[in-house]
Amino acid sequence: MAKYFYRASAADFMKIPGAPVAYWAVPEIFSSFVNFQTLGEVASPRKGLATCNDELWLRAWQEVSVKKTSFFEDKRLQTEPTWYPISKGGQWRKWYGNNQLLVNWKDNGRALKQFITDRYSGGSYTKEIRSEKFYFRDCVTWSDISGNSFFGARRAAEKSIISTKGCGIYSDSLDLDYISGFLNSKPAQLFLELTSPTVSTNPGEIASLPIAMSRQHMMAVQAYSKTCREIGRIDWDSFETSWDFTFPPIISLNDSASSLRNAYQIVRGKWPNKVRQMRCCEEENNQIFIEAYSLQDELNPDVPLEEITLTCNPHYRYGGNLREEALESLLQCDTVRELVSYAIGCMMGRYSVDKPGLILASQGETLQDYLRQIPSSSFAPDDDAILPLTDQEWFPDDATNRVREFVRVVWGDGQLQENLDFVAESLCLHAIKPNRGESALDTIRRYLSTQFYKDHLRTYKKRPIYWLFSSGKHKAFECLVYLHRYNEGTLARMRTEYVIPLSAKLNAYGEKLEQDKDASTSAAETKRLEKEITTLYKQQTELAEFDEKLRHYADQRISLDLDDGVKVNYGRFGDLLAEVKAVTGQK
């Protein structure tokens, strides 16, 4: 029976910072705040940088030239980086991750400091650039605002800057893994419900937490925390949204896979072990702290599956009350979507099946730059980084045919059709609806022409790196262009190599359809052909209008500066690009 009557002393409330009216709190909670040191006595929780204009000073890491970032490792470049990692919170995630944003801190933030000083009419920039002496030091970070009732602490990216929304905890006397272990424990969560009852968690509230520091258990907590951090790091880096991404897991396991389906089964079989391992470590960590605070009657160490914050864990990734079958189909579909995205990246030269990590990811890089790194590529990138996405096969090097070639190169000729069938089958689980009687290659073509770009925008949070040039709603012509390989001649080449030849192909196809209609003896066939001819005429009109606009912009020889960011650069091409409003935010 639920308890509805409590006896509480006002004096007890004063033992907790802020004196919350925690009438339900048991004596062990009050005594914890009395008997243990606070986290603020052994560590320094701090707020950091506020730029006063994030759109001007922050970028998603994929937007800029990787050679201008602090994590680019080629020491032959003797230039100071422009862009540095900044902790800005993000989704609820424990131990590791959410490393997505960069801040312009060139010349020790000189331009940003001047901007803030000018904003305050000659005032000091230190009003917004807080705790600067802590910048680039190792720390534990957390999201200032959590979208749910859970708090998640994780190690910040190496040599990063903290912010007002992604604060940091520093310590010279206490191991950071121990701090992570404490903050991610159930007792810490319970204490935070008292000291930080809102969705926002400030450094002062973190500093007020009582931290048990038993030497007997310190090594164990550090070990559990370190294991969780490493599992979280591997999980985060398994996706191309990480700057330390190398290969998709389904590719890296290919040596032991006889087919694409088998490769998925192998990697899918490994993920539950990672989830179980992290869950076990978290529960052992919980048990240590529960006993340290004598809260055995209030808390149990168990961690629900949906609270194991790994992307490979479908219970966390998709949430809700979905059945196992639904979770499995979502995970399979998304894994194949990620494989297709990686394949597109290989076509663009961003990645290579022959070398881990980023290959071409800086402004204006060319095929020659790729070949200097990989002279003999088993899957060569597109020579101009212009990749047609058409609903029919108008070009032999379109995205669909290149996906087919990618699958053949990675998994061989022997089971090519079976592997393509698996790709199509997986995409039809959730990405697109199945069409009865459609070939696997046609299904892949339909996904690429109708859904891929939507997925790409979602993956990169409306800061795409592959830009979709589109003739319009009739999709007469669409192609992807890789932002980092764009140059002033890209639009002219798009026009001469693809749009003008396509116009001639559509004309020839239209003549054939007219001839077929005239020769048809079936009313149903004639009606079908008439419908197709009508659609084709609309596409021809659309393509002619697109060609005129494309010529206008090609003559301008538009140049880009990746430091300006996708939002600004995307708006320089009028309505040649798809989803302009979504990317630029313009109404």
Image (spheres, rainbow, N blue to C red):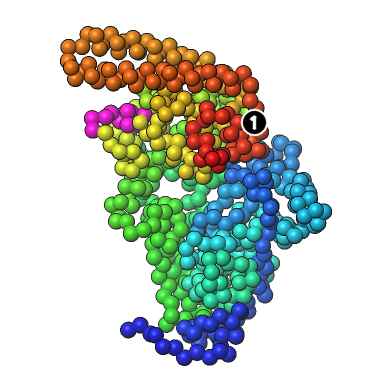
Where does the image place residue 163, in percent across and percent down from the top left?
Answer: 65, 57
Nearer to us in this view, 54 or 403 = 54
* Whether residue 474 is situated above or below residue 80 in the rendered picture: above
Specify the amino acid type for callout 1.
Leu
- Residue located farthest toward the right when viewing the structure as drawn: 122
For the point 51% across and 18% down, which residue is it?
Answer: 547
The N terminus lies in quadrant: bottom left
* Whether residue 199 is situated above or below residue 469 in the rendered picture: below
Q: Which residue is mark 1?
A: 560
Where does the image place residue 288, in percent across and percent down from the top left?
Answer: 49, 75
Nearer to us in this view, 117 or 409 = 117
Nearer to us in this view, 500 or 120 = 120
Q: What is the quadrant of residue 166 in the picture?
A: bottom right
Q: Is residue 437 magenta?
A: yes
Q: Which residues are magenta?
A: 436-445
Q: Alpha-carbon neighbours of circle 1 within 10 Å: few (<14), some, or many (≥20)?
A: many
- Residue located farthest toward the left when viewing the structure as drawn: 522
For the point 22% across and 16% down, which residue is it?
Answer: 526
